[in-house]
Image (tube, rainbow, N blue to C red):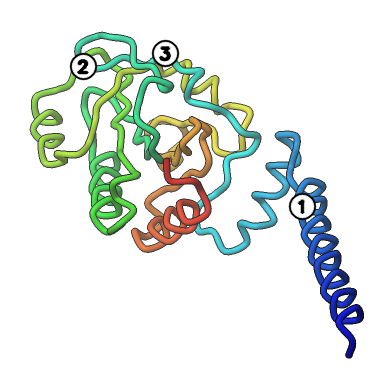
Amino acid sequence: MTQQQSKKGGQWQVWLMVFILGGVIIAGFLLFPHTEEARNRLLKSLGTTNHGEFVLPAVSIKDLTLKDGEGQVWLFDEQKVKWRMVIPGNANCLQECRDLLYLTRQVHISLGKYSRRFERFYLNFDNHVESDTAEYLKLHPFLHTLYADEEEMRKLLTETNAPFLSGTDSGEPLRVYLVDQDGRVMMSYTMANSGNDIIEDIQHLMKYSPDH
């Protein structure tokens, strides 16, 4: 092979690599969901092995008026970037509520290297906490309590496939909600889900989400 033929062969390989790379970039752009509807379809198709239920259509907890224990407004965009589990409740956290708190606590502990990217919130729809509930919440040192309006929560989720129902609504099970790093309510779970189910879902989602 002459030096000129070798040079042409090298140039051909370079152009082939450029062509392949360009094709991958274009394909990625065309396949990336540019609308919320397309994003939801993609999530649903990718979620064939998920254990929880994808919340569709997408809603955001940024639309809720949230306050901390001092009565100060809690703004999502001012917080650290994390995945969050929201456990709705009241001043008196009854047995099913406590079961969900215990389940999600075990999930948090078992997340291992992902635990630092995750936190739990007890969403209290009353303006106080009963003494026995306050004592129970002390058993959850990494649990944060926020206060919200129950009707706002109900309105936020009423048009989704995972509406918020209090423990007295038609005997329906209580739900907890997984919120992504941008505040979108991604998935819901009940006591029908095991801790391993929830852990597997969260680890899968965190694996493919940016670690800020």
Residue 193 locus on image (x, y percent): 41, 57
**On the rendered structure, is 54 left or right of 33?**
left
Mark 3 to mark 1 CA distance (whole Å): 41 Å
Residue drawn at the location 75% of the way across and 51% of the way down: 28
Which quadrant: the C terminus? Answer: top left
> At x 33% / y 43%, what residue is drawn?
118
Check disc 2 and report the residue beneath it.
Answer: 69
- Cα–Cα gap, marks 3 and 2: 14 Å
Labels 3 & 1 near each other (Cβ < 8 A): no
Within the image, what quadrant is residue 93 found in?
top left
Which quadrant of the structure image shows residue 17? bottom right
**How many numbered marks does the figure carry?**
3
| Residue positioned 49% across, 52% down in the render | 205
Mark 3 highlights which residue? 65
| Disc sitting over residue 116 in the figure | none
Tell me which residue sits at (42%, 57%) in the image.
Answer: 203
Q: In this view, does 86 lie to the left or right of 172?
A: left
